[in-house]
Image (tube, rainbow, N blue to C red):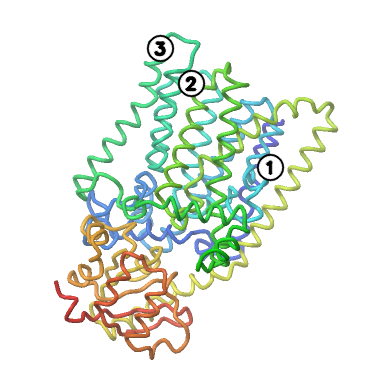
């Protein structure tokens, strides 16, 4: 009965926000689920042919996490229309999230013997303790059409298999490989697990070596196959998204972390230097800092507890290895990836481990609850909090003003494209955004941030020639749905005004020096959204 009660309650509270939105918004509900970067996946799904993947339909890319991209491409083929693909992708993420909740709950019950502690899976310990302050990273955040829902499902399955204690190492290795193909930056997990299993005392060394090999071999094979495919289709060993983002961010991330956790540092820096803080920007990005730092700190503490208190448990070596993998990934992201490029879909595994670890640490207290009355009171409190947060999240989704604007922009795609083609019959656009322009329109679109780019664009970005090389290749327009919104009257801007606007915009800093080599013309502006289409006009100095 307790298992059935958990199944029913967890399913209801997980699905409630999705069902409310679906009931309210009908066929347009996917716009209320999908996050911006989901449109990168959808655009690649639409533009790809054969065994290669492509964002612009012209050059191959590997700027995605492979398992989810394969599914999104299949979804676009199965549905045959953009809205159908959006719907299938969104509901796939929702179903995966539900599966992750149930698997994680079952894992917690196996670890602790308590279905009561399994209630922590919704909305998750991270959200209950800190995430609600910043409104990020509940389980419902994985409804976003990104790979996080699938990663959360696999994370829950992995922890459940670890908790079973009798799972064969090869089975664990296959699940870990699936996790790595879903989020390539989880490659630190098999390394950590193999390390811990190898050196964990208590069993014959030969057996430990064998188990470590079985745990890591599936990932090694999967990554080798992925790298082979990537080199064959794109000429690149590593994902272009990581290469475009990961050029070092230690100092920037360290400063933002200090400013987030101790605001007086901002005043101190302003007093001692000429620095002027963008306080609104720092506050707006605080969730990106906290979702990396807090789970990492918890994982470090939980790892210490595993080493000291739970080291005799059969699951301890693998759990310790998972914790080490999470910490190595956090360190990698802190050193190499600017906070702005990190979001909730990075942290499915760390969120699952935070909930499972908290339940394990709370298990002694739960066992001290004597009598049905005490357990019923705790269950009522946890259940009431979960229902409250589920209701609030449903209301937040349903009333988010950005979602209907995105829907309306997509619905007006015919008129907007006609306006662009009236000025440029064969448009090709550089999109400095999250994929909405590419997914919405039928003309070729190349990714200006190069997260979903190609080898040539990456080389041009690194050498400060992205705009010039793209212009030479026929991509003569700039646009962005998210990051280049222009005010009323921008249609009349002259070239210098456009240049000054772009110099102060969210364009990549490696691109901005090239702006001096071009004049600009405001081709058209999609109203009321303020989305510009800007024509590049090379100056004489722009020629190679």
Residue 16 locus on image (x, y percent): 64, 52
Q: Residues within 10 Å of mark 1 (few under 14, many from 20)?
A: some
The mark that comes first in sequence, 2 or 1, is 1
Image quadrant in which you'd find residue 3: top right
The label nearer to you, 1 versus 3, is 3
The quadrant the C terminus occupies is bottom left
**Does residue 413 sit above or below 138 in this rendering?**
below
Residue 167's label in the rendered image is: 2
User: Front-most of 248 and 458?
Assistant: 248
Q: Position of residue 316 (x, y in %)?
A: 54, 22
Q: On the image, numbered disc 1 is attached to which residue? A: 9
The numbered disc on residue 479 is none
State whether residue 395 is above or below residue 167. below
The image shows residue 436 at horizontal and vertical percentages of: 40, 66
Q: Residue furthest top?
A: 204
Distance from label 2 to label 1 (Cα)? 28 Å
Q: Check disc 3 and report the residue beneath it.
A: 207
456 vs 207: above or below: below
Query: Few, some or many C-alpha atoms within 10 Å of disc 2 (few <14, some 14-19, many ≥20)?
Result: few
Picture quadrant of residue 437: bottom left
* Left or right, residue 143 beside residue 46: right
Q: Secondary structure at mark 3?
A: helix
Q: CA distance from mark 1 to mark 3?
A: 42 Å
Identified at 57% across, 67% down, the residue is: 280
- Packing grade of label 3 (10 A; few <14, some 14-19, many >=20) is few
């Amino acid at each position: 009965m307790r298992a059935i009660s958990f199944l029913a309650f967890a399913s209801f509270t997980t699905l409630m926000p999705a069902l409310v939105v679906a009931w309210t918004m009908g066929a347009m509900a996917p716009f209320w689920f999908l996050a911006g970067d989901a449109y990168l996946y959808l655009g690649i799904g639409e533009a790809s042919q054969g065994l290669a993947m492509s964002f612009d339909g012209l050059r191959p890319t590997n700027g995605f996490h492979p398992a989810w991209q394969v599914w999104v491409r299949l979804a676009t083929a199965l549905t045959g229309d953009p809205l159908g693909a959006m719907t299938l992708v969104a509901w796939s993420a929702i179903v995966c999230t539900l599966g992750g909740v149930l698997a994680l709950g079952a894992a917690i019950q196996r670890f602790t013997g308590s279905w009561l502690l399994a209630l922590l899976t919704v909305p998750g310990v991270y959200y209950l303790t800190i995430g609600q302050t910043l409104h990020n990273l509940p389980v419902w955040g994985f409804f976003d059409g990104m790979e996080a829902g699938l990663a959360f499902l696999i994370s829950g399955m992995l922890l459940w298999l670890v908790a079973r204690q009798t799972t064969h190492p090869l089975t664990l290795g296959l699940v870990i490989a699936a996790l790595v193909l879903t989020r390539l930056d989880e490659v630190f997990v098999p390394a950590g697990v193999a390390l811990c299993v190898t050196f964990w005392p208590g069993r014959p060394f030969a057996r430990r070596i064998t188990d470590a090999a079985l745990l890591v071999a599936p990932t090694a094979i999967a990554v080798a196959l992925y790298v082979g495919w990537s080199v064959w289709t794109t000429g690149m060993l590593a994902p272009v998204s990581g290469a475009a983002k990961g050029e070092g961010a230690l100092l920037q991330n360290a400063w933002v972390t200090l400013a987030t956790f101790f605001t007086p540092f901002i005043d101190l820096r302003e007093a001692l230097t000429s620095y002027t803080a963008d306080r609104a920007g720092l506050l707006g990005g605080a969730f990106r800092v906290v979702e990396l730092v807090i789970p990492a700190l918890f994982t470090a503490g939980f790892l210490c507890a595993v080493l000291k208190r739970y080291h005799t448990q059969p699951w301890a070596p693998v759990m310790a290895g998972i914790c080490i993998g999470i910490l190595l990934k956090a360190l990698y992201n802190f050193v190499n990836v600017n906070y702005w490029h990190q979001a909730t879909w990075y942290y499915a595994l760390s969120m699952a481990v935070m909930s499972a670890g908290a339940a394990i640490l709370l298990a002694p207290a739960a066992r001290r609850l004597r009598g049905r009355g005490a357990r019923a009171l705790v269950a009522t409190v946890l259940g009431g909090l979960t229902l409250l947060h589920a209701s609030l999240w449903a209301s937040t989704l349903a009333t988010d003003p950005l979602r209907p604007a995105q829907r309306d922009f997509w619905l007006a795609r015919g008129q907007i494209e006609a306006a662009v083609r009236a000025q440029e019959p064969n448009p090709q656009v550089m999109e400095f955004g999250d994929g909405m322009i590419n997914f919405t329109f039928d003309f070729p679109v190349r990714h200006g941030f190069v997260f979903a780019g190609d080898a040539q664009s990456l080389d041009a970005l690194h050498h400060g020639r992205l705009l010039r090389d793209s212009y030479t290749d026929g991509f003569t327009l700039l646009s962005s749905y998210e990051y280049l919104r222009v005010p009323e009257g921008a249609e009349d801007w002259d070239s210098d005004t456009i240049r000054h606007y772009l110099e102060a915009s969210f364009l990549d800093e490696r691109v901005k020096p090239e702006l001096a080599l071009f004049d600009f013309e405001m081709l058209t502006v999609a109203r009321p959204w303020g989305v510009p289409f800007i024509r590049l006009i090379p100056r004489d100095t722009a020629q190679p």
